[in-house]
């Protein structure tokens, strides 16, 4: 029973068996469920890429980022390639995201339907990237993941890495061509992670094993 006060008098009524939801509430609930499913499949695909595989902050951030994007559902009816700005710079490692001085700039060209071209502009690694003491080299790991909106099915994945010396000398621009088909109705994420190495290639972890593994979403597109 539900007890309530109305116009100075107390009343009681039976709790309804079903609560009627408005159309916007139902629609938003469906979008959130869709976002959670997509986030789960994407994180499972990235399980060997994520620094903190079972971290709740990563799960919550990705759930919310995809949900906020899905709230713009009318845009999903448009044909062609669309940038998804709401997903950029989403952290995949809690507080240690791929942003600020813990990242390498990556520019993605999505225009070709069957490949993605990633360009790393010229840079001086020692000036561009914050790194722990005694760092001698840096590994930039890149990944592409495609996921359908309707059924959260993974449509493609690709991972590669580049070894870069951590030096004061300027490095030339690099271009990476990745074969990847962008299917209609699918979201595609470009993710990146850094690993730092000392002499003999040993990985630096420090006191916190997640501290020097910045990871996040660099760019994202939707193919209508």
Image: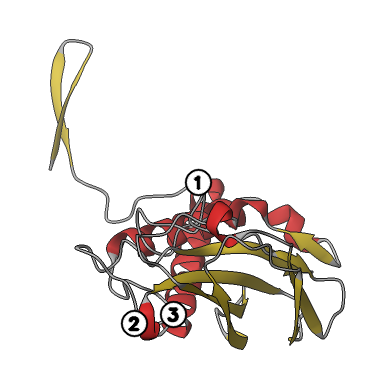
- For disc 2, the neighbor class at 10 Å (few under 14, some 14 to 19, many from 20) is few
Please name which of the two marks, 1 or 2, marks the residue nearer to the observer. 2
Residue 40 figure quarter: bottom left
Identify which residue is drawn at 60% across, 62% down.
218
Residue denoted by label 1: 22
SS for callout 3? loop
Q: Residue at x 36, y 66 (%)?
A: 134
Q: Picture quarter containing residue 183?
A: bottom right
**Circle 1: element type:** loop
Left or right: 121 with respect to 190? right
Task: Report the residue marked by disc 2.
Answer: 202
Residue of label 3? 49
Cα separation, mark 2 vs mark 3, equals 18 Å
Separation of residues labelled 1 and 2 (CA atoms):
57 Å
For the point 47% across and 59% down, the residue is 32
* On screen, residue 140 above or below 94: below
Q: In which quarter of the image is the C terminus?
A: bottom right
Comes first in the chain, label 2 or label 3: 3
Label 2 or label 3, whichever lies nearer to me, is 2
Mark 3: few, some, or many residues within 10 Å (few <14, many ≥20)? some
Give residue 61's position: percent from left, percent from top.
42, 56
Report whether 121 appears left or right of 159. right
Q: What element carries label 2?
A: loop
- Pick the quarter of the image with the N terminus: top left
- Front in this rendered view, residue 74 or 65: 65
125 and 8: which is toward the camera: 125
């Amino acid at each position: 029973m539900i007890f309530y006060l109305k116009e100075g008098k107390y009343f009681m009524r039976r709790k309804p068996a079903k609560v009627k939801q408005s159309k916007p509430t139902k629609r938003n609930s469906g979008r959130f469920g869709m976002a959670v499913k997509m986030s789960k499949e994407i994180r499972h695909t990235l399980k060997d890429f994520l620094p903190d595989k079972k971290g709740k902050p990563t799960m919550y951030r990705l759930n919310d980022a995809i949900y906020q994007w899905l709230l713009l559902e009318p845009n999903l009816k448009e044909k062609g390639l669309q940038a998804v700005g709401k997903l950029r710079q989403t952290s995949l490692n809690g507080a240690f995201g791929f942003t600020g001085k813990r990242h390498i700039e990556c520019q993605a060209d999505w225009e070709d339907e069957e490949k993605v071209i990633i360009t790393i502009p010229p840079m001086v690694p020692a000036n561009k990237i914050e790194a722990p003491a005694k760092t001698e080299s840096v590994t930039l790991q890149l990944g592409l993941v495609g996921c359908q909106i309707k059924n959260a099915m993974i449509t493609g994945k690709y991972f590669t890495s580049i070894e870069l010396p951590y030096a004061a000398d300027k490095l030339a621009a690099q271009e990476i061509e990745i074969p990847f088909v962008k299917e209609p109705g699918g979201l595609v994420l470009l993710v990146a992670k850094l690993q730092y190495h000392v002499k003999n290639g040993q990985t630096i972890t420090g006191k916190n094993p997640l501290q020097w593994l910045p990871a996040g979403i660099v760019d994202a597109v939707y193919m209508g």
